[in-house]
Image (tube, grey):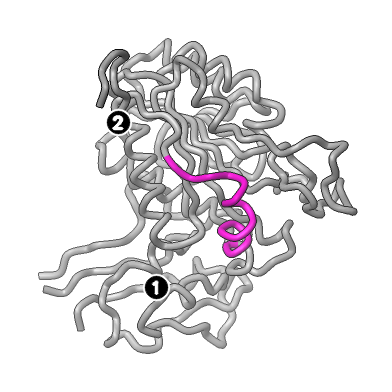
Amino acid sequence: MSKQIAGKPESMSPVVTHYCPGCSHGVVHRLVAEVLDELGLREQTVGVASVGCSVLAYNYFETDFVQAPHGRAPAVATGVKRANPNACVFTYQGDGDMAAIGTSEVIHAAVRGEKITCIMYNNSIYGMTGGQMSPTTLMGAVTATTPYGRGPEAGMPYRMAEILATTPGAAYVARTHVADVGNIVKTKRAIKKAFELQMKGVGFTMVEVLGNCPTNWGLTPSESNKYVTGEMLPYFPLGELKDVTKEVPAGVHA
Amino acid sequence: MRAKLELQENHCKGCELCVQACPRDVLAMGSNINALGYRPASIVDPEKCTGCKACALVCPEVCFTIWQVA
């Protein structure tokens, strides 16, 4: 009679997460778990957790999981995928993990065209350690280590997805956000495409998801979602930055 | 009633995102305190629910289960 249209995906553990109230990490976890359910990959998936707020991600996924040293999730995922080519391997990292200490690992994984999926949760701050400036912190943003706002001596925030999109081994690179209902649906579509292309063996896939950090931004959950759409989106444009399945071959004029 | 909505209040952290996302005012913040120490959301008008899933999409704790009633 009645059909279930929403609920906890099978790939997600029935526990309360340790994330702060309103944190979008839970939303991204759910989207990844729903995609694994829909593609039927749960039994062959190995996740690789990072260091940061998502360090305990292994508690929330009903798949095999490895916890990598800080920033080294793409390197660990490379080993897992090469040892077990039929596995679906994904990393789940924050901006401090992927864009600061792990820049080298993720860029070289992308350059080598490793058949893994990297999910980057970009909330432009170090959440777990108490709100320090990260490489993606916006100019002028007040954090624990930039009490007068991020100034020019710290450089400009950089865009990880754009950098990875220029690497030859990358098959699919997209940036989305999870601050409103419509874009949560679009994020799921991007994550699903990334996992599909990984399983087809096309190449390296990465989805950068813009999210909030209500606690360290000092905002309520709904205010922090407005900060994502109002302040972060102008600097971090959304879209599919690279998709090899869509590219027109050289010499062909569309 | 077009949809049956179930809310797991003991997992709710009271972030209020679902209350703001609901277009039909089905949800409101409750006055009780749950085991986690938060003030959870509660279903105040289940008859109005259309099953749009907005609450389930924004909920970071996956507290909502929704059935479409045929």
Residue A107 on image: x %, y %: 58, 20
Q: Which residues are magenta?
A: A225-239
Please report, as a chain letter, where disc 1 is located: B
Which corner quadrant holds the C terminus of chain A? top left
Which corner quadrant holds the N terminus of chain A? bottom left
**Looking at the image, is A84 positioned above or below residue A151?**
above
Along the viewing direction, whichever of A23 and A239 lies nearer the viewer:
A239
Question: Could you say whether the residue bearing mark 1 is in a helix, strand or loop?
Answer: strand
Along the viewing direction, whichever of A220 and A40 lies nearer the viewer:
A220
Residue A214 on image: x %, y %: 66, 61
Q: Mark 1 Cα within 10 Å, few/some/many (few <14, many 20+)?
A: many
Residue located 45% across and 15% down the image:
A169
**Residue on which the image places disc 1:** B7
Residue type, numbered disc 2? Glu
Give the Cα separation between the discs numbered 1 and 2.
32 Å
Q: Main secondary structure of the magenta part?
A: helix
Q: Number of numbered discs present?
A: 2
Residue A161 on image: x %, y %: 54, 33
* Residue B60 appears left or right of B1: right
**Residue on which the image places disc 2:** A196
Question: Could you say whether the residue bearing mark 2 is in a helix, strand or loop?
Answer: helix
Please report, as a chain letter, where disc 2 is located: A
Q: Is residue A238 magenta?
A: yes
Residue B24 on image: x %, y %: 35, 83
Residue located 42% across and 65% down the image:
B63
Kindly indicate the quadrant of the structure image that contains residue A117: top left
